[in-house]
Image (cartoon, rainbow, N blue to C red):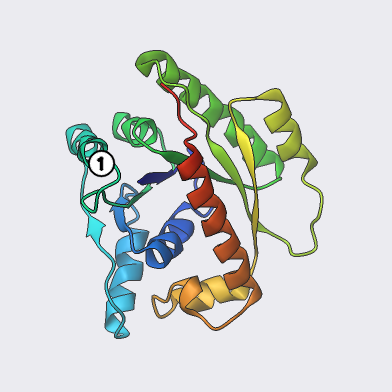
Amino acid sequence: MIITIAHTKGGVGKSLISFHLAVAMGAAVIDLDFQRTIIINNEMRVNNGKRSIAVLQTKTMQDLIKLRNHNIKNTGTDKEKNFIIDVGGFDSDVNRVAIAIADLIIVPANDKTNDIIGLHQFKQIIEEIEESTNLKLQPMLLINNVSPMTKDFISLETFVERNKNFKLLKSILRTRADYYKALETGTGITELKESKAKKEFKKFIKEVKKEVKNGQKKD
């Protein structure tokens, strides 16, 4: 299973989600973000006596395709591996391949105006990938880092209504202090004691697994 966390806009929470998802699912992370956030978080994790997550320095398109081919060959066996790809907030050929090979594309988003503008730019990239590969992609919008008080997300819902190749996940990851407190020691959110953040993230993981199982990408 390959899950790509992607968006051409920076600061939407891609690395934070990738890290916590990798810890929770026991998955390896492919860090394509030049800021090396995942690597730093993992070092903090090890320094605090926790088990390291696998962080791969895969940088080429060919290496990414090899990972995809390996999983296709070993689908349904114990040799099939779980990968989380943390895509940097920029457009590149490598990032486009990371999106194209994914079993699930997760796009963290907020309801702010700049985020909606960024989604329209990302939509253009998705369309260009589809045109060049003949794949039918369905990125999953994840409402992330929003106030616990916010209930309506009209802008995001309108975007999805007008762009049917996108889907809005039911899960919502709200702004919680626990996410940042956990990162201070490299702790995954699911490794904490019961909290609202942990409950929301576990619900998100359950939905992720369901979407992968259903198969959201069609050739």
Residue 38 position in % (x across, y down): 35, 61
Residue 216, percent across and down? 49, 34
Q: Which residue is mark 1?
A: 71
Looking at the image, is 83 positioned above or below residue 21?
A: above
- Residue drawn 55% across and 27% down? 123
Image quadrant in which you'd find residue 95? top left
Residue 115 locus on image (x, y percent): 63, 41
Amino acid type, callout 1: Asn
The single residue placed furthest to the front in the displayed view is: 76
Whether residue 110 is visible: yes
Say left or right for 71 vs 135. Answer: left
| Residue 70 shown left or right of residue 98 in the figure | left
Residue at (61%, 70%) from the top-left corner? 199
Q: Residues within 10 Å of mark 1 (few under 14, many from 20)?
A: some
Residue 71 % position (x, y): 25, 41
- Badge 1 marks a residue whose secondary structure is helix
Q: Is residue 106 left or right of residue 54?
A: right
On screen, residue 56 above or below 89: below
> What's the residue at 36%, 60% (across, down)?
37
Reply above or below: 121 against 81. above
Identify the image quadrant of the C terminus: top left
Tell me, yes or no, if residue 11 can be seen here.
no
User: Taking 39 as reference, is 201 left or right?
Assistant: right
